[in-house]
Image (cartoon, rainbow, N blue to C red):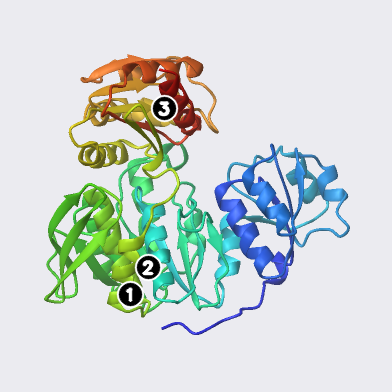
Amino acid sequence: MSESVQPELPESLRRAHLIGIGGAGMSGIARILLARGAFVSGSDAKESRALLSLRAQGAELFVGQSAANISSLSEPPSAVVVSTAIKETNPELAAARAAGIPVLHRAQALAGLMEGHRVACIAGTHGKTSTTSMLTVALQYCRLDPSFAIGGDLNESGANAHHGEGGVFVAEADESDGSFLTYVPSVAVVTNVEPDHLDHHGTAEAYTKVFRDFVDRIEPGGLLIVCADDEGAHALGDEAAKRGVRVQRYGRSVSGADDAEITSYEPLPDGGIVRISLRGEPLDVKVAVPGEHMALNAVAALLAGIELGAPVSGLAEGLAAFGGVRRRFEFKGRAGDVRVYDDYAHHPTEVAAQLRAVRTAAGTGRVLVVFQPHLYSRTKTFSAEFASALSLADEVVVLDVYGAREEPEPGVTGALIADRVTAAVHYEPAFDVAAPLVAGLAKPGDLVVTMGAGDVTQLGPEILAELDKR
């Protein structure tokens, strides 16, 4: 079990200014810094719930980004923290460099906060937010009070980060820009490895290599936990074992004496029960969120928790009580006997896994999905795969691409996907038309899920309002 720890705050983070502080990752770092006594300032393009919360905790915040935000502070920051999304032309970043203020990537700041803790990092192409969240809640049920930083808000607390009194730090490790190579985990989980973020990594081979480099960051004597049912993660585990890394596997396709074999999964309307054999002993784990992919995540969290010294009974209790993460099949409401959910799935494998889980939750009703492609590069590369995954629904509405950090690419629209969907499909490039369109398509007993990593999340309440009108 972990002992209480109060590590020294790194000197570089005692007066930290965070550019884009309202983002999921940055607001989490700010929350931990404030809890550990740092002076925190920062800016974001617009007001948000995150800014309101941080301001209430004592942060000095600016809406809008300007060099004056740096110069107006009573003392220069000890560091300016940025994410990969912040460009060199950002006026605050330029002002910091001109003034000689150290600039840290978000991952470097988080690594500084991890110092003095036993670190568990959850990585993978899919499932890392849910798995990190499950592990965090399970450890909380064991009264370990872990520090944590997650790419989503826990439904239990509404928080995406916390400075705990225990000696464990649980973090979601983001491979999208390779920044997770900053961390030095004692326990590392890799849920799966499947090509993504090729706009940054360039090739599937380079993407796979960054996971191998991540494994090399595990501290001596540490543990790598991989999903044996995923080809990429399985291969990663095999390579690591040959290099002397301690590896534990989970899934239906395991062989080692210390592995966790999934022997059965029973879907339930409100989740499922996964039966595993762990070191020859049977164990049933209730998972309160639907889908066998979530059961896999729960087993990964269980193994990580055991490695961190938590009791199996407490971990199982926490996993059974886990209420999910915002934007991960999050229930938005019911109107006219139509249920509306919202989900963050934005890769074909994620979309397919979630729609299979949604099918169970829908019962005898139809499944309607409103999908917003995320990134032009991802849409172009995986249009056929997205179409195949979406065809698992009964009816599909495809919106136009949410470009995020990318500039539009000629000929790359949501139609690339919609034209290949084999279910009933509608391509609707006008965002403001989507809610009344979906409300008109929905029938009593149907389940509607808005899906994607962009602003499609805004449509849930609008669809419910349209259904109420109907």
What SS does tag 2 mark? helix
**Residue 185, quarter of picture:** bottom left
Tag shown at residue 372: 3
Which residue is tagged 1? 314
Give the spatial CA distance, label 1 vs label 2: 7 Å
Please say if the residues under marks 3 and 1 sit with CB atoms less than 8 Å apart. no
Q: Which residue is drawn at 52% across and 62% down?
A: 182
Name the spot of residue 309 as percent of width and height, x first: 36, 80
Q: In which quarter of the image is the N terminus?
A: bottom left
Which of disc 3 and disc 2 is earlier in sequence?
Answer: 2
Q: In which quarter of the image is the C terminus?
A: top left
**Residue 172, quarter of picture:** bottom left
Q: Which residue is drawn at 46% across and 55% down?
A: 154
Which of disc 1 and disc 3 is earlier in sequence?
Answer: 1
Q: Residues within 10 Å of mark 1 (few under 14, many from 20)?
A: some
Please say if the residues under marks 1 and 2 sit with CB atoms less than 8 Å apart. yes
Tag shown at residue 138: 2
Left or right of 64 on screen, residue 423:
left
Left or right of 312 on screen, residue 363:
left
Q: What residue type is labelled 2?
A: Ala
Q: Is residue 176 above or below residue 347?
A: below
Give the spatial CA distance, label 3 vs label 1: 39 Å
What SS does tag 1 mark? helix
Name the spot of residue 335 as percent of width and height, x first: 38, 29
Q: Residues within 10 Å of mark 2 (few under 14, many from 20)?
A: many
Left or right of 431 on screen, residue 383:
left
